Image: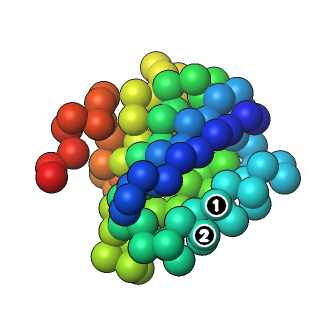
């Protein structure tokens, strides 16, 4: 999996591509999230449009991010899931837990 991130004020944006299967990158993403929360980020937008596959460890990474932000009064948005990832979110009922958006404009100011 590849990823990049950007912090803009109270918003953390992360773009994931490839396969989210935990590996070492999962820990690196969690570390970025921890740092962003320490810098007072309250919104996390995870662009998963280029994510091909997520396994249970990858789902755990997403849930950890969600928990960390919600514990601080923040929110996590999954943006533009691919068809395969969208099906997985529905099957696992994670679509009821995560805010799923198609663009940043959908986030209430």
Residue visible at 42% across and 66% down?
41
Q: Mark 2 points at which residue?
A: 35
Q: Is mark 2 on a helix, strand or loop?
A: helix
Q: How crowded is mark 1: few (under 14 residues within 10 Å), some or many (20 or more)?
A: some
Q: Is residue 87 in view?
A: no
- Residue 82 at x, y = what percent? 48, 22
Quarter of the picture holding the N terminus = top right
Read off the residue under disc 1: 32
Residue at the image position 53 percent from the left and 77 percent from the top: 38
Within 10 angstroms of label 2, few (less than 14), some, or many (20 or more) residues? Answer: few
Q: Residue furthest right?
A: 24
Q: Position of residue 34 (x, y in %)?
A: 60, 71
Residue 29, above or below 87: below
**In this view, which residue lies farthest toward the top?**
83
Between 97 and 35, the one nearer to me in the picture: 35
Question: In the rendered view, does 5 fall on the left or right side of 68?
Answer: right
Name the residue: 31% across, 76% down: 73
The residue under the point 39% across, 35% down is 79
Secondary structure beneath label 1: helix
Query: For residue 4, what is the image quadrant?
Result: top right
Q: Is residue 56 above or below residue 49?
A: below
Residue 94 lies, in percent from the top left, at 42, 50
């Amino acid at each position: 999996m590849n990823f990049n991130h950007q912090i803009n004020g109270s918003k953390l944006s992360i773009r994931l591509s490839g396969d989210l299967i935990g590996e070492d990158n999962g820990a690196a993403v969690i570390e970025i999230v921890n740092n962003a929360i320490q810098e007072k980020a309250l919104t996390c937008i995870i662009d998963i449009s280029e994510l091909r596959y997520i396994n249970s460890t990858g789902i755990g990474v997403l849930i950890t991010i969600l928990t960390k932000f919600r514990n601080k009064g923040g929110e996590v948005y999954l943006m533009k899931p691919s068809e395969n990832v969208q099906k997985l979110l529905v099957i696992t009922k994670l679509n009821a837990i995560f805010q799923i958006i198609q663009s940043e404009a959908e986030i209430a100011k």
